Amino acid sequence: MPRQKFFDTAIKPEKAVLVGIITPAETEQQEREYLEELEFLVDTAGGEVIGTFTQKMQRPDRATFVGTGKLEEINAFVKSEEIDIVVFDDELSPSQLRNIENELQVKILDRSNLILDIFARRAQTAQAKTQVELAQLQYLLPRLTRLWTHLERQKGGIGMRGPGESQIETDRRLILNKIALLKDKLKSIDRQNETQRKNRGQLVRVALVGYTNVGKSTIMNMLSKSEVFAENKLFATLDTTVRKVVIENLPFLLSDTVGFIRKLPHHLVECFKSTLDEVREADILVHVVDISHPGFEDQINTVNETLKDLGAVDKPTITVFNKIDAYNPPAENEHEASEPLTLADFKKSWMAKHNSPAIFISALQKNNIEEFRTLLYDKIKAIHTQRYPYDKLLY
């Protein structure tokens, strides 16, 4: 007699709904791109997007982010489709979060919380885990009240302090103490990393930077012939990886850093600034761009703004337009397919003129890699010659 199967061991992905608003400062196309990115974030976290809701508004509603009519529409969809989670494309205030949860009665996440969840899943080293935990606690601190709504009825009036209120104060004190401990731990890790950087000597340093999921880790693997984790997911790399690379007898240090993203939570940027010390201390930045992404120009701007915040925007930079094999140029006629661009076409394009020096490659297909190596070698050699004018043995 066959053995009865009592339960299914496969974990089903949580069903999610996305919610975004279109303000006068944004176009419908931009909001569509933001929600596509949010869907990719949900997919990276292991969820499945079932539906999307958008609303045109001057500004988010202070109480419920979207209007009451739209919230009722979302609520009906959540009930009919048995949705597990609703994800909002912007950061929600504690009161918005509480009001929406009371209305929808399902798990509510905003963009910041979702990114923090992905970071928590991806963190591998002690430094990354500490940084993520610190960011999570800083996010949680102003939202403590909604975790204790089950004690609200026990609160008294004036002069009657209820157990719910005292419990919140206790939790706040515990979290503040934990935040202080994590900050001290990060300072200790930073000192260790600084010592490691000093011990690497005076080799020229090159840092790969760019939007998340543009192919930085693939380029790292190609240049260093190492096995850095690379995957078609957002934030596949959290920990900065440093490898010694040699091109034509000229050694240098190559680092792969965490990818940037639009609307990255501010406290997350602050926590990860120590990880990005490799960017600040680099001699050359290699800005990797996914040219096949329809919003790659916005991604370039996002990366440049983040580099500006880090004080690294003025460093010598090579712009690497990756994934040329997947690039689809806009068609002149909507009824006709556009012709794929040749390498010569790319070099004559506005992208090359406005991002000089620029190189066009496909790291996956190994297209135009030798020209990239030569350009990188020339830039490194110029810095090395200036730093060590009497070192003629390498070239």
Image: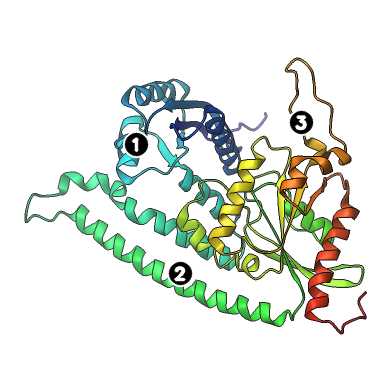
Q: CA distance from mark 3 to mark 1?
A: 44 Å
Horizontally, is 273 left or right of 278 in the view?
Answer: left
Quadrant where the C terminus sits is: bottom right
Q: How is the image coloured?
A: rainbow
Q: Amino acid at mark 3?
A: Pro
Q: Residue 281: image x %, image y %?
A: 65, 71
Q: Secondary structure at mark 2?
A: helix
Q: CA distance from mark 3 to mark 2?
A: 48 Å
Whether residue 148 appears in this view of the structure is yes
Q: Secondary structure at mark 3?
A: loop
Q: Nearer the viewer, mark 3 or mark 2?
A: 3
**Residue at (57, 63) in percent of width and height:** 128
**Residue at (82, 70) in percent of width and height:** 382
Q: Secondary structure at mark 1?
A: helix
- Marker count (numbered): 3
**Residue at (42, 72) in percent of width and height:** 181
Which sits earlier in the primary sequence, circle 3 or circle 1?
Answer: 1
Quadrant where the N terminus sits is: top right
Q: Nearer the viewer, mark 3 or mark 1?
A: 3
Circle 3 is placed at which residue position? 329
- Circle 1 residues within 10 Å: few <14, some 14–19, many ≥20: some
Q: Amino acid at mark 2?
A: Leu
Q: Which mark is residue 282?
A: none
Circle 1 is placed at which residue position? 101
Q: Which mark is residue 182?
A: 2
Q: Amino acid at mark 1?
A: Glu
Q: Is residue 270 above or below residue 30?
A: below
